[in-house]
Image (cartoon, helix red, strand yellow):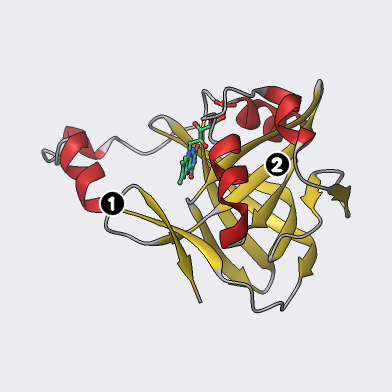
Amino acid sequence: MMTQPHPCDADPLVDGAAFRAAMRELAAGVTLITAQGEDGPRGLTATAVCSVSADPPTLLVCVNRATEGHAAISAAGAFCVNVIAHEHQLLAEHFAGRSGARGAERFAYGAWRRLATGAPVLEDAIAAFDCRVAQALDWGTHTVFLGAVAATQSAASGRPALVYRGGAFLAAG
Ligand SMILES: Cc1cc2nc3c(=O)[nH]c(=O)nc-3n(C[C@H](O)[C@H](O)[C@H](O)COP(=O)(O)O)c2cc1C
């Protein structure tokens, strides 16, 4: 729950459109965040992912509370961050809802397995971080989940990563 006073109370903030316009310039690696919900697997495309600490191994993700993935992460207390390759662009669009697929249907594409927590792991992801929720902070429309990393997968394949900038998918590396 939000415990601090909202900063809007003290100083005016930039409007949402200006914030989004500036954020579009921040190139970000694309991931699929997945979780094993009470009604099966759920997942979403996400770029709001960041390393927090190597000791203990921890990352954070920011997930919109309106998504099915949010409910699944909250119920399971776990999630997996799948870092995807440029060749996975269609999967990124699919998990962003652009193909119309929702819920467990999204997992009809790709080969999936499990590691430590039971969250779906994309077999040919460039890297995957299987996490247990250590803390959750609601802020605005989103929840920041801190994930303690229980298992990883890394391919060291040299395949170009999928990056998002200015509303477009790009290859990096
Ligand atoms: C490139 C890209 C990055 C995204 N990053 C995030 C993110 O970090 N967090 C988030 O909650 N949604 C993000 N989204 C939006 C979700 O992928 C999208 O709303 C998805 O359909 C949510 O799943 P739902 O259908 O269960 O609501 C992103 C979408 C795209 C295309």
Residue at image x 56%, y 71%?
160
Q: In x, y percent, where is residue 106?
A: 70, 31
Estimate the x, y position of residue 74 in percent, counting from the top left: 68, 32
171 displayed left or right of 135: left
Q: Give me the C-alpha separation between circle 1 and circle 2.
A: 24 Å
> Which residue is more in the foreground, 113 or 109?
109
Residue reaching furthest to the left: 12
Q: Quadrant of residue 55?
A: bottom right
Q: Earlier in the sequence, mark 1 or mark 2?
A: 1
Please state the horizontal and vertical placement of residue 161, each as a whole percent of the image: 55, 66
Mark 2 lies on residue: 34
Residue bearing the label numbered 1: 23
Viewer-closest of 150 and 43: 43
| Residue found at x 53% / y 40% | 93
- Do tag 1 and tag 2 residues touch (Cβ < 8 Å)? no
Q: Give the answer, above or below, for where 161 lies relative to 137.
A: below
